[in-house]
Image: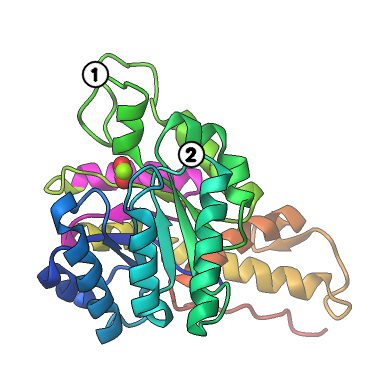
């Protein structure tokens, strides 16, 4: 199923008030954190808050995700068991941070399968979101993407990534001082995007920490959206509308994409003359135009956009 993930809202599991408030925000996805936004001493309580919030419901059509701790810690197994046993049917995906190898995905897949079986949950329904946050994860990304059919997204984790490669900057999302010849993140973003497209996953950009700087958020989100990313994290309610807008097609583009699809369907059919390349207004369209239109149309449909124009086949002469 193609889930819309234009905006992925991070909420610390240790904060019941924020878990409640998230229900009313227009984010496509909410992820409840037990990892880096939760202090070690607060992790057991966070698991409990999350189970209670998921079971209480009220998240509407949002994708409901829990971020567990990574496999190098002592917490992962208990995070997964407590949350999935406690709220499995009300949970869509587990987010696994700092993924370094395909084995780490396999381990989570096996654990999820056992929990699903022993609790009578549908086996395989819960997806995995993999965060790519260090050099090893990026180098192994192709294997990580293919390690389980549960993998739905590959997510760039810029803060951990910058730290792990010794990048000399403390400002997540902005260029490191001293680097003045392009975008220091281009390779990482493109590598993630290539794996996502090669293996049919969603590519998600990570957080922008300067939450007061909405123009900065839009600028950085606009870059990954332009490359082809499907969405970006939001850390504050003000970032939600910006993400939804930046990662949706513009209304004109969405209408145009749907027109291309309808026109191409019509003109390639026997009724429309079985043509391969045809004119739509002043524009020549062919099979490659249809493929590009499919991308824009899929994003618009997933975002629930309305169509404001329809295709009228030429009147029979
Ligand atoms: C997110 O987890 C990040 O490290 O940027
Ligand atoms: Mg991180």
* Residue for point 36% across, 46% down: 222
Name the residue carrying label 2: 100
Is 183 colored magenta in this rendering? no
Horizontal side of 30 relative to 313 (left or right) equals left
Residue 89 point in image, percent of width and height:
42, 82
Q: Is residue 29 above or below residue 168?
A: below
The quadrant of the image that shows the N terminus is: bottom right
* Relative side of 269 to 141, left or right: right
Extreme residue in the top direction: 178
* Crowdedness near tag 1: few (<14), some (14–19) or many (≥20) residues, C-alpha within 10 Å: few
The residue shown at (76%, 57%) is 287
Magenta stretch: includes residue 224? yes
Q: Say which residue label 1 marks.
A: 177
| Closer to the eye: label 2 or 1 | 2
Span highlighted in magenta in the image: 215-238
Quarter of the image for residue 13 reads bottom left
Mark 2 residue element: loop
Q: Nearer the viewer, residue 181 or 88?
A: 88
Spatial CA span between label 2 and label 1: 28 Å
- Residue 252 appears anywhere in the view: yes
On-image quarter of the C terminus: bottom right
Residue drawn at point x = 65 percent, y = 57 percent = 282
**Placement of 59 over or under 225, stated as above or below:** below
Disc 1 secondary structure class: loop
Say the numbered circle drawn on residue 168.
Answer: none
Of marks 2 and 1, which one's residue comes earlier in the chain? 2
- Residue 298 percent across, percent down from the top left: 56, 67
């Amino acid at each position: 199923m193609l889930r819309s993930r234009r905006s992925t809202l991070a909420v610390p599991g240790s904060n019941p008030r924020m878990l409640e408030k998230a229900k009313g925000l227009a984010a496509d996805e909410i992820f409840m954190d037990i990892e880096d936004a939760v202090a070690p001493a607060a992790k057991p309580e966070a698991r409990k808050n999350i189970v209670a919030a998921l079971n209480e419901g009220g998240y509407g059509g949002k994708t409901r995700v829990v971020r567990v701790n990574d496999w190098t810690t002592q917490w992962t197994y208990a995070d997964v068991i407590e949350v999935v046993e406690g709220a499995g049917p009300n949970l869509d995906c587990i987010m696994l941070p700092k993924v370094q190898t395909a084995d780490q995905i396999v381990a989570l897949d096996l654990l999820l399968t056992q929990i699903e079986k022993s609790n009578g949950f549908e086996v395989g329904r819960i997806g995995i979101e993999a965060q790519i946050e260090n050099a090893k994860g990026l180098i192994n990304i192709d294997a990580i993407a293919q390690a389980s059919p549960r993998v739905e997204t590959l997510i760039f984790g810029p803060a951990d990534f910058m730290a792990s490669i010794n990048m000399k900057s403390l400002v997540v999302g902005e260029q490191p001082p001293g680097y003045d010849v392009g975008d220091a993140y281009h390779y990482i973003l493109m590598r993630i995007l290539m794996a996502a497209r090669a293996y049919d996953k969603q590519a998600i950009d990570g957080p922008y920490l300067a939450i007061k700087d909405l123009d900065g958020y839009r600028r950085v989100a606009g870059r990954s959206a332009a490359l082809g990313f499907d969405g970006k994290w939001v850390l504050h309610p003000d970032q939600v509308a910006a993400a939804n807008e930046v990662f949706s097609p513009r209304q004109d583009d969405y209408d145009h994409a749907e027109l291309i699809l309808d026109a191409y369907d019509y003109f390639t059919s026997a009724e429309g003359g079985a043509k391969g390349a045809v004119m739509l207004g002043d524009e020549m369209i062919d099979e490659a135009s249809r493929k590009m239109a499919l991308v824009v149309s899929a994003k618009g449909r997933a975002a629930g956009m309305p169509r404001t124009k329809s295709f009228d086949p030429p009147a029979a002469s």
